[in-house]
Image (cartoon, rainbow, N blue to C red):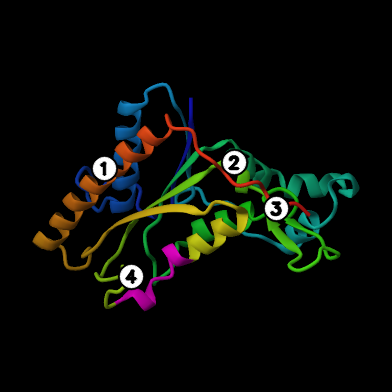
Amino acid sequence: MATLLHLDASARSGLSGSQPHGSHSRRLSAHFVTQWQRARPDDRVVYRDVGQQPPRPVSGDWIHAAFTKPEARDSWMHEVLAESDSLVDELLEADLIIAGVPMYNFGVPAGFKAYIDNIVRVGRTFGFDRSRPGLPYWPMLSAMGKRLVVLGARGDYGYEPGERMEHTNHVEPHLRTVFAYLGIEELHSIAVEYDEFAGERLQQSLIQAEQRVEALVDRLAASLDVPRVVSDPVSG
């Protein structure tokens, strides 16, 4: 049995096509999970809405606590890190992370940035040792075989590699960098475009995105039945 971590980051609360002004990214992430549950009904799904209930932003106290060794932390430090610990625990338990992340001003929504800042944790998701030869940092999730699926929405069009707006897309490249830093290097992305144009182009983009979601579900679900070779983690 696999565990899916389903994240939504849109400020919009509903699903497009079902509620007025609903979210396209929520629609895609919900479609993915629905199709997955049809294929693998026994798998566990953990849901977190960081768009409607964003994690607390990182503060000076958070930084102080996170970079204090666990055995040396005061009680207030454990309290400050409690939410972050819960988010990290969910990530560690997940085999597949499904993230509905729309593009806001060429990057990720603030709620998802707060989520990222809470899960990038020294000693939990990445290692750090000043005395280590070469780079002092190393990923701690490399040997876990985790996969990330990013399901997005964009107001304009042409943000894919080689297209007219590629240089302004700071969503997938940012997420690829951050999660690879933790050791999650397999990333799949699908996005709806033309939201600001509406009309037929938007509808066709939605249809094509949902078809791609269904094909991706089929590939990933089938691959879970095939043994995977995962590289050994880099140790400090």
Q: Amino acid at mark 1?
A: Ala
Measured as percent of width and height from the top left, residue 76 is found at 82, 48
Q: Secondary structure at mark 3?
A: loop
Measured as percent of width and height from the top left, residue 111 is found at 50, 57
Reading the chain from its start, which is encountered first: label 4 or label 2?
Answer: 2
Measured as percent of width and height from the top left, residue 126 is found at 69, 54
Residue depth check, mark 3 versus mark 1: number of the one nearer the observer: 3
Foreground: 81 or 223?
223
Reading the chain from its start, which is encountered first: label 3 or label 4?
Answer: 4
Residue depth check, mark 2 versus mark 3: number of the one nearer the observer: 3
* Residue found 33% across the figure and 52% down from its top: 25
Q: Which residue is mark 1?
A: 215
Distance in Å between CA atoms under marks 4 and 1: 20 Å
Q: In the visual, does 140 lie left or right of 19?
A: right
Reading the chain from its start, which is encountered first: label 1 or label 2?
Answer: 2
Residue 14 shows in the view: no
Q: Is the Cβ of the residue at disc 1 closer than 8 Å to that at disc 2?
A: no
* Residue found 54% across the figure and 51% down from its top: 184
Give the magenta-colored segment's residue range. Answer: 165-173
Q: Which residue is mark 4?
A: 161
Q: Residues within 10 Å of mark 4 (few under 14, many from 20)?
A: few
Residue 64 falls in image quadrant: bottom right
Q: Amino acid at mark 2?
A: Met
Q: Residues within 10 Å of mark 2 (few under 14, many from 20)?
A: some
Q: Which residue is mark 3?
A: 234
Residue 58 falls in image quadrant: bottom right
Distance in Å between CA atoms under marks 3 and 4: 30 Å
Quarter holding the C terminus is: bottom right
Foreground: 83 or 232?
232
Q: Which residue is mark 2?
A: 144
